[in-house]
Image (tube, coloured by chain):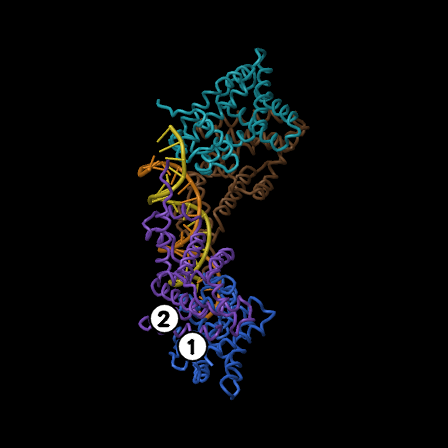
Chain colours: A blue, B purple, C cyan, D brown, E yellow, F orange
Amino acid sequence: MPRPRSDDKRAAIIAAATRIIAAQGLGAATAAIAKEAGVSNGSLFTYFDTKADLLNQLYLELKGEMGAAALGGLPAVDARTQMLHMWSRWMDWATANPLKRRTLAQLQVSDEITASTHESANRTMTGIGEILERSRANGPMRDAPAALVFTLSNALAEATIDYIIGDPDRADEHKQSGFEALWRMIG
Amino acid sequence: MPRPRSDDKRAAIIAAATRIIAAQGLGAATAAIAKEAGVSNGSLFTYFDTKADLLNQLYLELKGEMGAAALGGLPAVDARTQMLHMWSRWMDWATANPLKRRTLAQLQVSDEITASTHESANRTMTGIGEILERSRANGPMRDAPAALVFTLSNALAEATIDYIIGDPDRADEHKQSGFEALWRMIG
Amino acid sequence: MPRPRSDDKRAAIIAAATRIIAAQGLGAATAAIAKEAGVSNGSLFTYFDTKADLLNQLYLELKGEMGAAALGGLPAVDARTQMLHMWSRWMDWATANPLKRRTLAQLQVSDEITASTHESANRTMTGIGEILERSRANGPMRDAPAALVFTLSNALAEATIDYIIGDPDRADEHKQSGFEALWRMIG
Amino acid sequence: MPRPRSDDKRAAIIAAATRIIAAQGLGAATAAIAKEAGVSNGSLFTYFDTKADLLNQLYLELKGEMGAAALGGLPAVDARTQMLHMWSRWMDWATANPLKRRTLAQLQVSDEITASTHESANRTMTGIGEILERSRANGPMRDAPAALVFTLSNALAEATIDYIIGDPDRADEHKQSGFEALWRMIG
DNA sequence: AATGAATGAGAGTTCATTCAT
DNA sequence: CATGAATGAACTCTCATTCAT
């Protein structure tokens, strides 16, 4: 796998794409992204084969970062506390990184993101899935398909984040409400 | 008397847009939509001022149809039964109209849809909001902001629909699971 | 020559075209002209075969009106006084009808105006030509080609008008200066 | 090092625009100009931001060239001889470059040309204005506004050129007539 | 005759991608 | 490998003209 030399440049493009897409949407020109990254438009294509490729890698990166943020510093305690910890960090990451969150939301629904990218993004979420599994092990959804539980929980999290972004002053309160709703659902 | 402006033609364009956007995304060319509608590309612009206008009207139409579908034939009974009825019809509409649902999902996150369009779309959802209010009146979220409850419930519904579309054979089962999750959350 | 019935409507279109072209230039849409005339866009084409036809007829009309204005009330006196009279009325018409003058100026240089239209417009200017001929009969340009004298005189008049429009407060003064320049040239 | 932006290509586009506009008017398609220049239609826009930009730059170029032609090789002699020299070179340039002259005439009256472009074009004409000032210093228009004198003289020149183009066989004769008319007016 | 909806050929401009330097 | 000029297909929207009513 011959990779181009500078990881810095790759990272700069990824970061620039995050910013530009947050501002302009997925229709943003690759030239605009390259410029924001301080790189020539031609160079962008030595790091990413196509625009779609860039988008897919960006998605992986952002989703991975979000997952890692959620799982960081996980205490070895009971499921509910772990879940709350994760939930809390997830919301915190989203409010602290509104641009990343915004871009990620756009990518999530784009049809430029391939099935295989979605799949491998989900694979990085395994840790989250495991906590979810432990959380619902004795709850009312214990017999539902794991993927359904995951989908519903994720939807709740995203909706809570959206709501918090619209009313950031009461973030903690909404974060708590959302978590309790989740726990009622699965716990 | 000139040829009168034809409601059929307007409807044909709306329908064509639904199909084409479901297949190609919001980037679909107006010419492709016009062709699918059996209309010249110029004609599209006598029915809709701009592409954005078409998108906004399409959004209103689809969202309105979805809301009407959800609320149709509502029995005058207790909140839970009403909610279940609505939930069920909502899922049914979505599974019966996958293209409309797909296009609606794209429009929902597009930034071509203006704030005022979103607002007036939401106004058509008032009926749904009322049922939700009755449903949570005595439940654990009775003190949460109405908008948060609405957001979370909506997210659950959308997620359930997505899941059902991915595994349509067990639609009824998932529909039921989703509803119970919702009810635990708010009921 | 089957002419459509309403002369009023024809006149309304001509008048509307004058206004719209003065404001928007020759690229103005026929639909805009029709609307300004209070007529349907289709109707415009029963009075004028094509846009070019409208433009040509408009040119003839405006040029004719301008010529008539210049020649009106011509006193039967010596050449210089006649010339001054004409010059004065010409300038007056132009300052009193800035829209017509503006549109006429645009048409004059348009390549939509055919050679034959130019020719017949010039034919309506015969009266002016005659005064010019008498004016230069004993002057320094007595042996120059009539058409050259005409062209130069016309250019002087147009330039004087342009200048007056740019500084209308001293119109009379500039009108006088221009005339004297003309007379020195040919008289 | 990328392919440097080529002055040749810019010049080719300017030259092509001159030819195409002379033939087809200002409505000529940018694609036609690009093709005539042997360049892709996209490339035109790397040299000129918009069609209007191209037109403005073309105007500046042509007017500048015309002014330079008129002022070239100016002898240090009396005003009349200088004026005649300039007049003669001006006419010669116009007859030798009918396409440029034709295109310039169109641009002169176009409303795509901005006020600021007109202004800076006029600034390149300062040399001509100075000769004009010297020429009229003791003549009958010595007290008229400089701008009026300039306007009238220019109109005479343009009209003479037009006339010459229509009867090129007797160019020298007409050139002379025009000059004498001018000199009577201001000298 | 009048209306205005219908048509479809362009128009200017953008942009992902390629490639000469 | 980096650069940015070059490419040309594609896009939305306009408009003179036609034609069903």
Q: Position of residue C62 (x, y in %)?
A: 49, 26
* B88 lies above or below D56: below
Q: Position of residue D151 (x, y in %)?
A: 59, 32
Q: Residues within 10 Å of mark 1 (few under 14, many from 20)?
A: some
C149 relative position to A1: left or right: right
- Given the image, what chain letter belongs to the residue carrying mark 1? A
Above or below C56: residue B112:
below
Dividing the picture into quadrants, the one containing residue A137 is: bottom left
Labels in figure, total: 2
Tag 1 near tag 2, CB within 8 Å: no
**Which chain is home to disc 2?**
B
Residue lying farthest bottom? A76
Judged from the image, the secondary structure of the residue bearing numbered disc 1 is: helix
Disc number placed over residue B164 in the picture, else none: 2
Vertical comparison of B115 with A108: above or below: above
The numbered dot on residue D88 is none
In front of the other: E21 or A90: A90
Mark seen at residue A150: 1
Q: Residue at x 42, y 70 (%)?
A: B159
Alpha carbons under labels 1 and 2: distance apart: 14 Å
What amino acid type should be assigned to the residue bearing mark 2?
Ile
Q: Quadrant of residue D77?
A: top right
Residue C141: where, in percent of width, then height? 54, 19
Residue sitting farthest toward the front: B77
In which quadrant of the rendered view does residue C118 lie?
top left
